[in-house]
Amino acid sequence: MGLAGERYGQRGLSGWFVKSLPDLSWARFGVEIFLTKIAHSREIPIILPLLTGLTHHIKESKLGYLAGFRYRLQMYQECLNALLNWKKYL
């Protein structure tokens, strides 16, 4: 993350790249990791646009501490799955 209020993480994808992607329904929270891994494996440059003034509410503030924490753990599990298993979904 850059300066306060600046966020990275959004991606703009070319139509030909999107059409070449396999099914992404398994990835859920890990989709950004999966897209990054595919792009790197195909030597496609990645540009992370700087978006200023964006905020988001964390799950704990939306769902309460316990439910939000469980949801966050699920998110981490899905990200780790994408990181470790991305090649098998190609």
Image: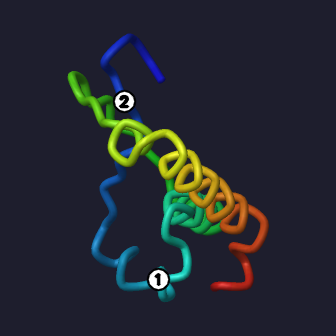
Q: Decide: is 50 above or below 17.
A: above
Left or right, residue 67 beside residue 43:
left
Q: Residue, x 56% and y 49% (percent of image)?
A: 72
Image location of residue 86, percent across then percent down: 69, 73
Image location of residue 29, percent across then percent down: 51, 62
Q: Residue, x 75% and y 73% (percent of image)?
A: 85
Q: Earlier in the sequence, mark 2 or mark 1?
A: 2
- Amino acid of disc 2: Arg
Q: Residue 9 — which label?
A: none
Disc 1 packing (10 Å; few <14; some 14–19; many ≥20): few
Q: Which residue is mark 2?
A: 7
Left or right, residue 54 beside residue 69:
left
Image location of residue 77, percent across then percent down: 68, 61
- Amino acid of disc 1: Ser
Asked whether the residues under the numbered discs 2 and 1 touch, taking CB atoms below 8 Å apart as contact, a structural biologist would say no
Q: Residue, x 33% and y 44% (percent of image)?
A: 62
Residue furthest left as drawn: 53
C-alpha gap between disc 2 and disc 1:
25 Å
Is the C terminus in the top left, top right, bottom left or bottom right quadrant?
bottom right
The residue tagged with tag 2: helix, strand or loop? strand
Disc 2 packing (10 Å; few <14; some 14–19; many ≥20): some
Q: Residue, x 57% and y 57% (percent of image)?
A: 75
Q: Decide: is 5 above or below 88.
A: above
Left or right, residue 19 beside residue 45:
left
Image location of residue 4, percent across then percent down: 36, 12
The residue tagged with tag 1: helix, strand or loop? loop
Left or right, residue 29 beside residue 80:
left
Q: Residue 25 — which label?
A: 1
Q: Nearer the viewer, residue 4 or 63?
A: 63
